[in-house]
């Protein structure tokens, strides 16, 4: 059993392996840290994120802690943590598992959905294999129907997400969904989810979000100390791990100090004296699906802001117990504020884009849409209108999947965009 799980782990690691140039940058620091018996450099630590998560989940499982898989940022990690469980993100980012999924799912479906389900049918995701429960949600139609198939052989709990974000009754329904999840977890895992446990979990997740926000805010600088790809790597599929939080703090100290010396990391990696500042919006870049980000930065840019669910979107807001002392209501409010494209209408996304454009000063906006992701695809019309007519910035929409077959075409379009940006002088 362990051998099979380790094989699955290897496939996950290979799906998200760093480029050779990035790996070699961290090796001297890693060797120096090891020689001094110091913690590894943050880049080296998070390069081994899947291995660390495997060890953490294996130890937790051995200690009797449940593993709970999550599929979306709308799922409240705080309630899972308060139940004594380990929340693990199970979203698939590998093209290798898609053919197996297409034996059950239509080919013209979002690659994230197919990759995730492919891991399920092949048994190649050890975290999914370990999961005592998967908490899903009614966001897009494709995921909802995929959950029905997965639920036939995996314990599944589905949150009903109201999608009229501005309706007061919708928030009340979401609060009820949070209370039902609390009760379900308490019953399933035979535990009491007390107010004290909820508050402790809230404080832990607020700390994690705060540290990740501070790292993201380093990108506002004229010469960011990280590339967008490097920043994306500074995260974990398991939430609330103390070792990760310490590495976030270490990263802030290291890159904050490095910035005082004004090194031109972006120029060194992209080999461009003045990289174009890009705001990337749209679908999430889950572990293993970072190809488009790499193409963008490899074409002479630095992605200074990622307005998506693997970037700033889920960490912009904390759970606020001062404004709302009831922990469950406070959790519901924070998560319901996520400006996902499944919401109708979705004004918070456009408010967020306006604010992020002011803060991070991008020279253009690129929107990434996975093929068959209808909500983001349709909403892209309004995003383009906002970017071009209100923000007065060049806009490019990229529609693709997990296959690298269109990489040359994407690169050509991105390079043309950057030429236009430079021709305009700004």
Image (cartoon, rainbow, N blue to C red):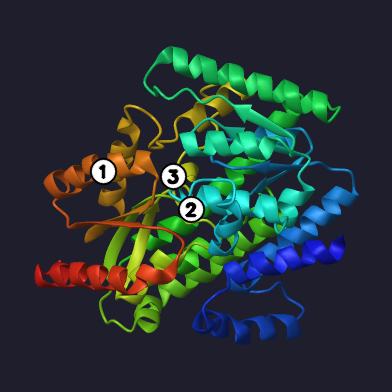
Instruction: Verify CB contact (< 8 Å) between mark 3 and mark 1.
Output: no
- What residue is shown with label 2? 111
Residue at the (25%, 49%) spot, across then down: 358
Instruction: Verify CB contact (< 8 Å) between mark 3 and mark 2.
Output: no
- Residue 138 lies, in percent from the top left, at 53, 30
Quadrant where the C terminus sits is bottom left
Lateral position of residue 233 relative to residue 270, left or right: right
* Mark 2 Cα shell of 10 Å, populated few (<14), some (14-19), many (≥20): many
Quadrant where the N terminus sits is bottom right
Residue 59 visible (yes or no): yes
- N-term-proximal mark, 3 vs 2: 2
Residue at the (30%, 51%) spot, across then down: 359
Q: Which of pointers 3 and 2 indicates the residue nearer the eye?
A: 2
Query: Foreground: 271 or 407?
Result: 407
Q: Quadrant of residue 279?
A: bottom left
- Residue 200 lies, in percent from the top left, at 71, 35
Q: Secondary structure at mark 2?
A: helix
Identify the residue at the far top of this view. 169
- What residue is shown with label 3? 313
- What residue is shown with label 1? 354
Report, in whole angstroms, how far the alpha carbon at label 2 lies from the one at label 1: 29 Å
* Mark 1 Cα shell of 10 Å, populated few (<14), some (14-19), many (≥20): some
Query: Foreground: 315 or 307?
Result: 307
- N-term-proximal mark, 2 vs 1: 2
Q: Secondary structure at mark 3?
A: helix
Lateral position of residue 124 relative to residue 265, left or right: right
- Residue 25 lies, in percent from the top left, at 54, 83
């Amino acid at each position: 059993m362990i051998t099979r799980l380790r094989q699955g782990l290897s496939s996950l690691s290979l799906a998200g392996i760093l480029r050779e140039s990035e790996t070699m940058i961290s090796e001297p620091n890693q060797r120096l840290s090891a020689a001094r018996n110091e913690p590894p450099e943050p880049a080296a630590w998070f390069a081994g994120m899947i291995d660390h998560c495997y060890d953490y989940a294996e130890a937790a499982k051995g200690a009797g802690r449940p593993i709970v898989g999550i599929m979306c940022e709308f799922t409240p990690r705080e309630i899972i943590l308060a139940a004594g469980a380990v929340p693990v993100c199970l979203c698939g980012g590998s093209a290798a598992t898609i053919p197996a999924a297409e034996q059950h799912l239509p080919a013209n479906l979002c690659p994230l959905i197919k990759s995730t389900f492919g891991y399920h049918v092949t048994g190649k995701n050890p975290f999914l294999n370990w999961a005592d429960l998967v908490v899903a949600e009614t966001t897009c139609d494709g995921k909802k129907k995929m959950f029905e198939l997965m639920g036939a052989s995996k314990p599944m709990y589905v949150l009903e997400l109201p999608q009229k974000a501005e309706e007061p009754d919708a928030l009340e329904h979401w609060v009820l969904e949070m209370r039902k999840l609390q009760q379900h977890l308490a019953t399933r895992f035979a535990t009491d989810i007390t107010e004290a446990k909820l508050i402790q979990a809230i404080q832990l997740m607020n700390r994690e979000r705060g540290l990740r926000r501070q790292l993201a805010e380093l990108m506002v600088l004229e010469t960011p100390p990280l590339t967008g790809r490097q920043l994306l790597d500074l995260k974990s599929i398991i939430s609330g791990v103390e070792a990760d939080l310490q590495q976030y703090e270490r990263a802030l100290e290291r890159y904050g100090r490095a910035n005082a010396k004004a090194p031109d990391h972006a120029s060194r990696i992209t080999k461009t004296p003045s990289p174009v500042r890009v705001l990337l919006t749209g679908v999430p870049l889950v572990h293993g699906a970072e190809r488009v980000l790499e193409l963008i930065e490899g074409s002479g840019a630095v992605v200074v802001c990622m307005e998506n669910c693997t970037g700033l979107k889920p960490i912009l807001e904390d759970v606020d117990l001062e404004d709302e002392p009831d922990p469950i209501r406070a959790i519901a409010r924070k998560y319901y504020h996520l400006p996902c494209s499944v919401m109708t209408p979705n004004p918070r996304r456009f408010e967020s884009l306006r604010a992020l454009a002011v803060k991070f000063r991008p020279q253009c906006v690129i929107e990434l849409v996975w093929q068959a992701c209808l909500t983001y695809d349709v909403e892209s019309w309004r995003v383009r209108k906002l970017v071009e007519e209100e923000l007065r910035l060049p806009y490019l929409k990229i529609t693709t999947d997990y296959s690298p077959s269109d990489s040359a075409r994407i690169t050509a379009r991105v390079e043309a965009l950057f030429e236009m940006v430079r021709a305009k002088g700004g």
